[in-house]
Image (tube, grey):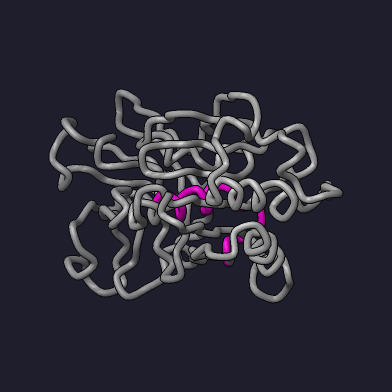
Amino acid sequence: MAGIITLLSDFGQSDGYVACLKGVILGICPDVRMVDISHMIKPQDIRSAGFILFSSYGCFPRGTIHLVVVDPGVGTDRLAIAVRTSSGVFIGPDNGIFSLVLQKEAVLEARSIENPDLQKRPVSKTFHGRDIFAPAAAHLLAGLPFGLLGPTCSPAISEWALPCSTPEGVEGEIIHVDRFGNSITNVSGDALRGRGSLERWRVQAGEVSGLPVMETYGQAPHGSAIALMGSSGFFEIAISGGNAASELGLNTGSRVIFGIP
């Protein structure tokens, strides 16, 4: 293992939830290095959390453990899972939050976290991050064999992570809005490859249609709405010098359609 646990959640910074995660981890593995990816995910926004994880995990050393707690189904029968890949381990709720990562990374092993000896007692129905996910991450970093977490399982892949190819083009949706208002879609370059040069494509985002596909923000006149390939490998809707989300009324889940007129 790399000795690193990353933390990603929708807990914000005004409460003690993040501190609880870190305190539990330190109590089991005091030499751990923890890195906060973000705790400012919009509450319950699984799409956004999945995208932030996807766009950042590859920057960390192999063997890093990624702990993700965006969990609107906490306390229900959804599984708590750990997924081992060649890049590292991903721990969190089985609610599709790892969908984008698992389209890129082959699953070497996946386990439902059920071993009661690894849980903080009593287990709260509303805080599995503290009582189940954080202890599992820390025990793995301390050397626990992966198989002792619990039985094998198959992680869920959510439909929101999969654009739909049609004879006319590709239909997808917004999965994240960054602080600049750029609205990232689930449509990657692979989805359009082999179907015509990019400059021929036009995009409908929300109620706005005919957006051109460009390579840089600077290619577009100031105030113009465009689509372009972002650093994550997914197309995003942007306004040169503006905020596409607010000006075009886009949110996570908003529909986008790529086509050639």
Left or right of residue 188: residue 137: right
Q: Quadrant of the C terminus?
A: top left
Rendering quarter of residue 18: bottom right
Between 159 and 168, the one nearer to me in the picture: 159
Residue nearest the viewer, comparing 99 with 184: 99
Q: Residue at x 71, y 43 (%)?
A: 118
Taking the spot 19% from the left edge, 70% from the top edge, the residue there is: 218
Query: How far from the left and from the top, in percent, is residue 253?
Result: 53, 46
Q: Main secondary structure of the magenta part?
A: helix
Residue drawn at (86%, 49%) of the image: 122
Q: Is residue 50 left or right of residue 134?
A: left
The image position of residue 211, as x and y in percent, is 29, 53
Vertically, is 179 above or below 60?
Answer: below
Which corner quadrant of the image does residue 59 belong to? bottom left
Segment colored magenta = 40-54
Give percent across and percent down for residue 184. 40, 53
* Badge count: 0
Q: Is residue 21 left or right of residue 227?
A: right
48 drawn magenta? yes
Q: Is residue 8 magenta?
A: no
Residue at 59% across / 65% down in the picture? 30
Whether residue 79 sits left or right of residue 121 in the image: it is left
Q: Position of residue 6 (x, y in %)?
A: 50, 58
